[in-house]
């Protein structure tokens, strides 16, 4: 990687010590209409601007620039086991569809800087809509399909879109989820409802109703613009490209604002170094396009490097628990990306599914989004016989913060750690009390020393104050933190111990709920566990465990499992960490993106108000917890 050497250590040092030179080199991986005048403007920290004065376009980099060399190569494969439909689009076909969609947007008076809310299932049309916005310089804001009307209304009011694009319906496990009534309800609630709604009618909802004068049919309009040529809008590198709200695990979601040039450069770099995917190769991310992973590694990352992106609508277990692997075999997937939650779902099924298909093309499985517990990591690692790599990142960062870089110089993985700082991320672990750097193996808060590298958020949409107060106000020094608790070992591997609010204090001992979860999950009978602290008169706080089992057993089996969990914790962390109560439940409350809602669990186990539940996936899971609490451990 240039005269600076090719080992991870050398390249990383270059990226931190000479960021302008490093990023000037990386910027060559994308097309610029006008080259940047300045690589970094850091004159108003913590705001910073990358590739100042350069003009580029995400759609051009993701689609147009590949037409000549790989127009007939697959760009996007969208598989749905819900509708049993597969759409395969070459770069040329994608270009055609995106151009037509962009012309439709322009005909609806959408232009540079206008927001467009996209509320769609995980289908090709969602990707086309995103790219069409990017093409004309409109700012897309994808809201995960299936979020309740109220969540959608909140995001609409924050983004104030000129247009909303939705589908008639989605499907989940064979069940119809009608989107349009949710859109109608959201628009009725919102103070800033857009004047027009564009509906992709999949023909799933026979009762689909249209509001005259407001609701338009996507297919009809696209047909009218089928041959349209829409030139890309060249944008200054720091113009907003899209908004995306965080998962809302800790409270009201924040509207992360991404730029154009920095995002494109970070995508190109990470596809090569982190994900080891290049032109003509296939990446399968099981994420929904509504999440950060979906934006970065289902859409922009793979397309910017000329790879093929595989998009999947459906459950990981339908028609059977081998579906992901059968797709990997069919499309010769090289790199797969999923989440620990997804793997834990598979773990309830026979590991033989992992060996049923020809996975000779598959090189890597990446997992991100939440702690990867060792039992889950080992199960999938042994079952697949492929390297499993944990990535730590955030919606805000848009690409990995902690990772291993098999495309550059693969360091050995250590279970429980997402690895080493990614290129460009100057990471520190800070002692909360003193504000000083924690030593090796000392716990602290993970922070990024500004400037944030390209690809990370520019600000919180319309709310610079919240950008500062949410991320930069925790320490005397100007440091970015989303308040994750971490420890770095002597080799520089960082372990994420949970969020700082997930730390509990038992009789003066600070314990990460994550550490206890890890140990409890190691019990053979346990599928998944959540640990929260509840107040205790004597000790201040005590750990309480909620766990689901791999197989529903009788009462004796459940008791034995609970005893086994308690013994493991005592043996490994000491009696101080011994769970005060263990509840065996059928489901744990999670956000729509699959994250445990520990704050709500903690609240209801103390009979407090569970707080903002707008991102809760399945309300039954919380009811189930309440019933378990009433029954007793
Ligand atoms: P909100 O910020 O709205 O409360 P959120 O933090 O869950 O929600 P995301 O951006 O989806 O929103 O998640 C990022 C967080 O997920 C990280 O800050 C971290 O707490 C957790 N996380 C992500 N990847 C990992 C990982 N590999 N190991 C441990 N934790 C992880
Ligand atoms: Mg967060």
Image (cartoon, grey):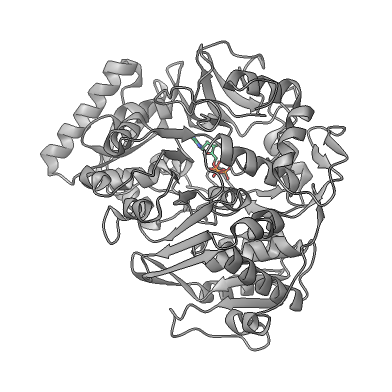
- From this view, report whether residue 46 is shown above or below residue 248: above
Q: Quadrant of the C terminus?
A: top left
Residue in the foreground of this view, choosing between 379 and 467: 379
Q: Is residue 98 visible?
A: yes
Residue drawn where x is 41% and y is 44% of the image? 604
Residue 278 lies, with reference to residue 481, above or below; the image says below
Q: Is residue 102 left or right of residue 388?
A: right
Q: Determine the image quadrant of residue 314.
A: bottom left
Is residue 580 in view? no
Residue 113 percent coordinates (x, y): 79, 61
Residue 45 percent location from the top left of the image:
81, 32
Q: How many marks?
A: 0
Q: Is 422 situated left or right of 546 in this image?
A: right
Q: Quadrant of residue 532?
A: top left
Name the residue at 32% across, 37% down.
380
Residue 360 locus on image (x, y percent):
34, 43
**Which sits in the foreground, 421 or 546?**
421
Work out which quarter of the rendered image holds the N terminus and state it: top right
- Horizontal side of 33 relative to 409 (left or right) equals right
Q: Furthest residue to the front?
A: 69
The x, y position of residue 282, in whole percent, is 48, 50
Q: Residue at x 64, y 19 (%)?
A: 10
Q: Residue visible at 63% across and 50% down?
A: 304
């Amino acid at each position: 990687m240039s005269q600076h050497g090719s080992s991870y250590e050398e390249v990383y040092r270059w990226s931190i010590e000479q960021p302008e030179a490093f990023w000037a080199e990386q910027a060559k991986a994308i097309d610029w209409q006008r080259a940047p005048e300045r690589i970094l403007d850091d004159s108003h920290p913590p705001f910073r601007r990358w590739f100042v004065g350069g003009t580029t376009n995400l759609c051009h980099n993701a689609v147009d620039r590949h037409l000549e060399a790989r127009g007939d190569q697959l760009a996007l494969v969208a598989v749905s086991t819900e509708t049993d439909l597969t759409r395969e689009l070459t770069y040329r076909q994608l270009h055609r569809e995106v151009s037509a969609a962009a012309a439709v947007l322009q005909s609806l008076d959408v232009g540079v800087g206008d927001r467009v809310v996209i509320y769609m299932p995980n289908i090709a049309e969602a990707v086309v809509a995103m790219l069409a916005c990017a093409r004309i310089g409109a700012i897309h804001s994808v809201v995960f399909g299936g979020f309740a009307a109220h969540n959608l209304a909140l995001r609409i009011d924050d983004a104030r879109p000129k247009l909303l694009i939705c589908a008639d319906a989605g499907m989940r496990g064979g069940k119809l989820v009608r989107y349009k009534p949710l859109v109608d309800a959201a628009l009725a609630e919102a103070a800033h409802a857009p004047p027009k709604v564009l509906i992709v009618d999949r023909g799933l909802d026979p009762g689909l109703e249209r509001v005259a004068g407001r609701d338009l049919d996507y297919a009809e309009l696209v047909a009218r613009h089928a041959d349209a040529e829409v030139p890309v809008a060249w944008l200054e590198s720091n113009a907003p490209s899209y908004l995306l709200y965080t998962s809302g695990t800790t409270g009201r979601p924040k509207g992360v604002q991404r730029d154009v040039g920095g995002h494109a450069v970070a995508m190109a770099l990470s596809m090569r170094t982190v994900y080891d995917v290049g032109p003509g190769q296939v990446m399968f991310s099981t994420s929904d396009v509504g999440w950060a992973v979906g934006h970065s590694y289902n859409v922009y990352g793979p397309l910017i490097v000329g790879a093929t992106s595989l998009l999947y609508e459906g459950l990981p277990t339908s028609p059977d628990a081998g579906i992901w692997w059968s797709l990997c075999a069919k499309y010769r997937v090289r790199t797969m990306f999923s989440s620990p939650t997804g793997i834990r779902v598979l773990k309830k099924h026979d590991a033989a599914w992992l060996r049923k298909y020809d996975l000779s093309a598959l090189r890597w499985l990446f997992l991100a989004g939440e702690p990867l517990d060792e039992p889950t990591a080992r199960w999938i690692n042994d079952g697949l016989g492929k390297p499993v790599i944990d990535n730590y990142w955030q919606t805000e960062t848009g690409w990995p913060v902690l990772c291993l870089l098999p495309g550059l110089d693969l360091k050995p993985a250590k279970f429980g750690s997402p690895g080493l700082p990614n290129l460009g991320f100057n990471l520190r672990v800070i002692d909360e009390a003193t504000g000083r750097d924690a030593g090796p193996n000392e716990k602290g808060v993970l922070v990024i020393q500004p400037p944030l590298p390209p690809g990370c958020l520019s600000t919180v949409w319309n709310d610079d104050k919240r950008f500062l107060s949410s991320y930069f106000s925790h320490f005397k020094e100007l440091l970015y933190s989303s308040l994750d608790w971490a420890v770095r070992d002597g080799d520089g591997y960082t372990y994420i111990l949970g969020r700082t609010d997930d730390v509990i204090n038992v009789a003066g001992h600070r314990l990460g709920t994550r550490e206890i979860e890890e140990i409890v999950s190691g019990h053979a009978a346990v599928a998944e566990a959540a640990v929260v602290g509840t107040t205790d008169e004597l000790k201040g706080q005590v750990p309480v465990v909620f766990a689901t089992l791999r197989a529903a057993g009788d009462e004796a089996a459940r008791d034995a499992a609970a005893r086994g969990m308690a013994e493991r914790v005592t043996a490994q962390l000491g009696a101080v960490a011994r769970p005060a109560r263990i509840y065996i439940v059928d489901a744990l409350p999670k956000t729509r993106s699959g994250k445990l809602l520990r704050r709500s669990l903690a609240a209801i186990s103390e009979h407090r108000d569970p707080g903002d539940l707008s991102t809760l996936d399945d309300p039954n899971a919380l009811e189930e917890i309440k019933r378990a609490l009433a029954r007793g451990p």
